[in-house]
Amino acid sequence: MDFSHDIPTRVFFGRKCLHKNKEHIAHFGRKALIVCGKTGAKASGAYEDAVDVLDELHIGYQTYDNVLNNPSLENVKEGGDFARAYRPDFIFAIGGGSPLDGAKAISALFSNDMEPMDLIEHPERIKQMVPVLAIPTTAGTGSEVTPYSVLTVPGLRTKKSFASYKAYPAVAFLDYRYTESLPEKIAVDTALDAFTHLLESYLSKKCNPMVETFSLSGISHFAECVSRIKESKFDEDVRMHLMYASLMGGLAIAHTGTTFLHAMGYSLTYFKGMSHGNANALLTREYLRYNYPEAREKIDRILGLLGFDCIDALGDFFEGLVEGIPGLLSEELAEFAGLSALQNSIRNGPREIGIPEMTEIYRRTFTKI
Ligand code: NAP
Ligand code: FE
């Protein structure tokens, strides 16, 4: 056994954890920039709580609320310009993965002399970042504890992420009450994303005994929710388990990154408008089938924890949760596979994969439907 593991984010989990731990915010400075999208931060109540806490601590703030879903380089550039005009001491990121990732990019652009594309091409130029404090309002990405920011790059016709140790949020406040306002469709979608983080990290070549603990713990908590997800019963207990599963997924991929499942999902989001979790979920059946020869024991273990007796049972369950499955033209199969091959993450899976195999996985996934 030979590994290292380092997660610099301080995590608070539980009902009202922001108010209960507000003293951990005071030392970040006197000026906060709240970064969020138009809907989630306010609908969840997290925005109001953050403003209350900032007022109580006599910290001034401004709000940039224009982070879009799957934020693009152009979008975070606008946020970076906003930050440059206000010059915050720290950033309060509130929302799903999009605002959280957007906030990391905005912090990097504000704190360094960089163009947005440099984030992707030269992340080593990120020398400093004002601290990001994260409040997730979805239970899915785990971005509150990862060093990643996933951005849409129109020039490359896909999403690309940058990773920087500096991009780990300084503090994460996970209060599962904030997911109560999620429409069921988004609650399911984000839960599926969390699951694929747990799955991909567990199967990754980079998995270590600590990652395995995070992944399996998260999968066990996800398993607690399977029957209630099937019945659309998103009670408080389910929301708590899913928020925990999402956190474990984040802690796991912070170390391993993702694998070809995420890489292949990006084209379905970019070209077909599928949500991130749905795209991943739809590809899960063929992902597991492809990897089974190299990861039989691990995949059987996951299926057992979830209460499914075979890959198809899990595949059917996930496919039933996916809404609005698009059609794929035959020429798109190889094109999307070629774009997936641009992602370094495809090298992390248990089994080698290239463009022909990914083309075949798209084909199998979309001809069956
Ligand atoms: P999202 O794009 O952040 O949010 C999806 C939708 O839900 C948005 O319309 C959002 O509204 C709304 N919403 C969020 N919270 C809500 C709440 N509590 N109540 C009502 N509506 C709410 O979705 P996400 O799945 O959390 O994040 C996806 C992004 O994260 C993708 O770009 C993905 O690539 C990335 N990601 C990042 C990592 C990482 O480690 N950094 C890992 C996996 C995925 P508003 O946005 O208008 O507020
Ligand atoms: Fe993801």
Image: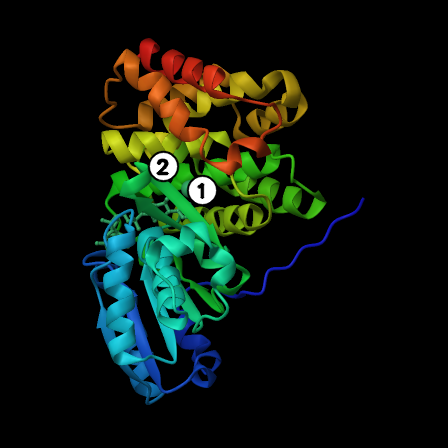
The reply, left or right, for residue 271 in relation to residue 353 is left
Q: Give x and y (percent) for residue 106.
A: 34, 64
Task: Give the residue furthest to the top.
Answer: 367
Which of the two discs, 2 and 1, labels the residue nearer the N terminus?
1
Say above or below: 121 vs 365.
Answer: below
Say above or below: 214 vs 20.
Answer: above
Q: Which residue is at 40% across, 23% downward?
A: 337
Residue 316: quadrant of the picture: top left
Asked if the residue at tag 1 contacts the one at tag 2, i.e. Cβ–Cβ closer than 8 Å, the answer is yes
Q: Which colour scheme is used?
A: rainbow
Q: Which residue is at 54% across, 22% downward?
A: 353
Query: In which quadrant will I find the C terminus?
Result: top left
Q: What element carries label 1?
A: helix
Amino acid type at image mark 2 = Gly
Query: In which quadrant will I find the N terminus?
Result: top right
Task: Give the residue furthest to the bottom.
Answer: 58
Q: Give x and y (percent) for residue 344.
A: 51, 37
**Residue 245: which disc?**
none
- Mark 2 beta carbon near ligand 1 (under 8 Å): yes
Amino acid type at image mark 1 = Ala
The reply, left or right, for residue 294 in relation to residue 334 is right
Asked whether residue 347 is in view, the answer is yes
Q: Which residue is at 29% across, 19% downward?
A: 332
Q: Give x and y (percent) for residue 259.
A: 52, 34
Q: Name the residue under label 2.
A: 277
Q: Name the residue under label 1.
A: 194
